Image: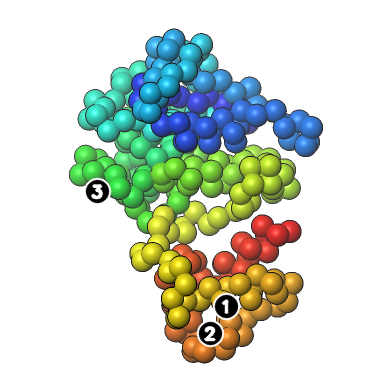
Amino acid sequence: MKTVACVVQDGFAPFEFGVACEAFGLDRSADGVPNFDFRIVAPRPGVVRSKIGFSINVEHDLSFAAEADLVVFCPVPREVWGDIDPLLVDLAREAVARGAWVMSVCSGSFILAAAGVLDGRRATTHWMYAHTMADMYPAVDIDPDVLFVQDGRIITSAGTAAGIDACLHLLRQELGAEITNRIARRMVVPPQRDGGQAQFIDRPIPVAPTDSLAVVADWAMENLREDLTVDQLAARALMSPRTFARRFKAEYGATPAAWLGRQRIIQA
């Protein structure tokens, strides 16, 4: 993968746009990371306004994206979900047809759905928009509970920060784990979160209630070099292993083993 096109239009979301720029557009050659030919493109070049008011000047039309190895579709504003720009629809169809990598972040998935390239495929989007997408595009197998989904060379991610996980997931496949870990370290994020992890935790994490697992989690963080087991953690929480595992996943959004693994990676 050498060329990356980041597709924006009026009403683009700054954070998700920034994620694509951060993951694929920065020069990290000093860290031994290959550079991509990264360009921001739009259906109509010129001034493109973000959803919070500032504008960027986009120099490139979609011709670069038509040949790019990866096409990233940034979120599209709600008011155009039912009327996606035909130029973007054609771009998505052609990118999939020629075997390019195609990624959508957050509501960018509505472009792919409008193009029909998600029909019969599993996909995701921001959990707030999942029901709308399911109603508009019943042929798409929407999973509202995951961070990202890869189906072939199409990657759809949930909202906001989930785009980081999707980008790192793709980079890991293209550049390998070692280089991707360098990128993640520069971004100050975990190198890998499982795509199947929940988008949000069903109940708020308590700040400091008496039955909180925070004390156990703090102890585990101080002893990550040890071969910790669920039984050990459960004993410190004065719970059975089964109850502890259930409570832990409810509060932290991951199993104890998965959470420990991520913390070890972060501190490595």
Question: Where 55 sits versus 239, above or below?
Answer: above
The residue positioned 73% from the left and 35% from the top of the image is: 33
Residue 117 marker: none
Spatial CA span between label 2 and label 1: 6 Å
Spatial CA span between label 3 and label 2: 38 Å
The quarter of the displayed image where residue 23 is located: top right
Task: Name the residue that disc number 1 marks.
Answer: 216
Colour convention of the picture:
rainbow
Along the polypeptide, which appears first: circle 3 or circle 1? 3
Q: Nearer the viewer, mark 3 or mark 1?
A: 1
Residue 237 marker: 2
Question: Where 36 sits versus 177, above or below?
Answer: above
Is residue 213 toward the left or the right of residue 126 in the image?
Answer: right
Mark 3, other Cα within 10 Å: few <14 / some 14–19 / many ≥20: some
The residue positioned 48% from the left and 13% from the top of the image is: 57
Type of amino acid at the residue the image marks with label 2:
Ala
Mark 2, other Cα within 10 Å: few <14 / some 14–19 / many ≥20: some
